[in-house]
Image: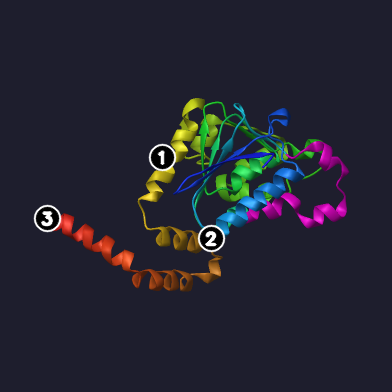
Amino acid sequence: MNTLILDERDDRLVVRLHRPQARNAIDAEMVGELHEVCARLEREPLPLLLTSGTPGFFAAGADLAELLERGRDQALQGVNSTLFERIRRLPMPTVAAVDGYALGGGAELAYACDLRVASTRVRFANPEPNLGIIAGAGACWRLKELVGEPLAKLVLLAGHPIGAEEALSSRLVASLHEPEGVEAAAHALIDRMGAMSPAALRLTKLVLDAPPGAHPLADHLAQAVLFEDPDKRSRMRAFLDRRTG
């Protein structure tokens, strides 16, 4: 791949955005390569750790040279939003390790992940109205779900950047670390997930993301599948044995 660096491991896939000459701006080639990553993880579900190969920059938004030439038809195709929603719906959990600037589409890419850990120099911002457009790849609805309406409106309507401490206090990020420790923190989160039942993780994510009208039926169906899983019996038996041993 030309815009991504893949680190393939037995229990996770690490993907590093890698367009250092453009501060990891998201262009059509990167969109296509991220779709390839999604297709692979849909076939062979593993947790995803998404980060940057460029210190100080997660992603500096969409590639403006390409964005300038897009018209109505491309906007209706939802080039970036379709990709980010696909990432959001990957079968297993996704963790973004964000160091430095996550701007525009770069911020929206981070918002699409299930969890985020960040560096002490992180800065999320959605300056799209300054460019005559909206944050059209998920921020206008996803950010409100993540941090609440007042802060989302401050970011989207008044250009307010979310720095490290505010990102932590609003729970936009799970934890803060020095830049050299961000990726290790993301790996630690995935390590914790790795100790859990893969089937239970996958079904928990499905139930969490189900629309309100799907509950409690979605919960009951997921639990019914898991109650018949031999892994459930072995895990519960091991727990009971430890408690009584």
Q: Which mark is residue 212?
A: none
Decide whether residue 207 is among the magenta residues. no
Q: Residue 90: image x %, image y %? A: 56, 56
Q: Is residue 136 visible?
A: yes
Q: Which residue is farthest left? A: 245
- Quadrant for the C terminus in the image: bottom left
Q: Secondary structure at mark 2?
A: helix
What amino acid type should be assigned to the residue bearing mark 1? Answer: Ala
Q: Earlier in the sequence, mark 3 or mark 2?
A: 2
What amino acid type should be assigned to the residue bearing mark 2? Answer: Asp
Decide whether residue 68 is among the magenta residues. yes
Q: Residue 46: image x %, image y %? A: 49, 53
Q: Secondary structure at mark 1?
A: helix
Q: Nearer the viewer, residue 170 or 90?
A: 90
Q: Nearer the viewer, residue 56 or 130?
A: 56
What amino acid type should be assigned to the residue bearing mark 3? Answer: Gly
Q: Main secondary structure of the magenta part?
A: helix
User: What stretch of residues is rendered in magenta?
Assistant: 62-86
Which residue is labeled 2 in the image? 209
Q: In percent of the image, x 87 and y 53: which residue is there?
A: 72
Cα–Cα span, label 3 and label 2: 38 Å
Q: Nearer the viewer, residue 1 or 160?
A: 1
Q: Are marks 3 and 1 in contact (CB under 8 Å)?
A: no
Which residue is labeled 1 in the image? 188
Vertical relation: 44 (above or below) 230:
above
Which residue is labeled 3 in the image? 245
Dot 1: few (<14), some (14–19), or many (≥20) neighbours within 10 Å?
few
Q: Earlier in the sequence, mark 2 or mark 1?
A: 1
- Quadrant for the N terminus in the image: top right
Would residue 74 be found to the left or right of residue 240 on screen? right
Q: Quadrant of residue 5?
A: top right
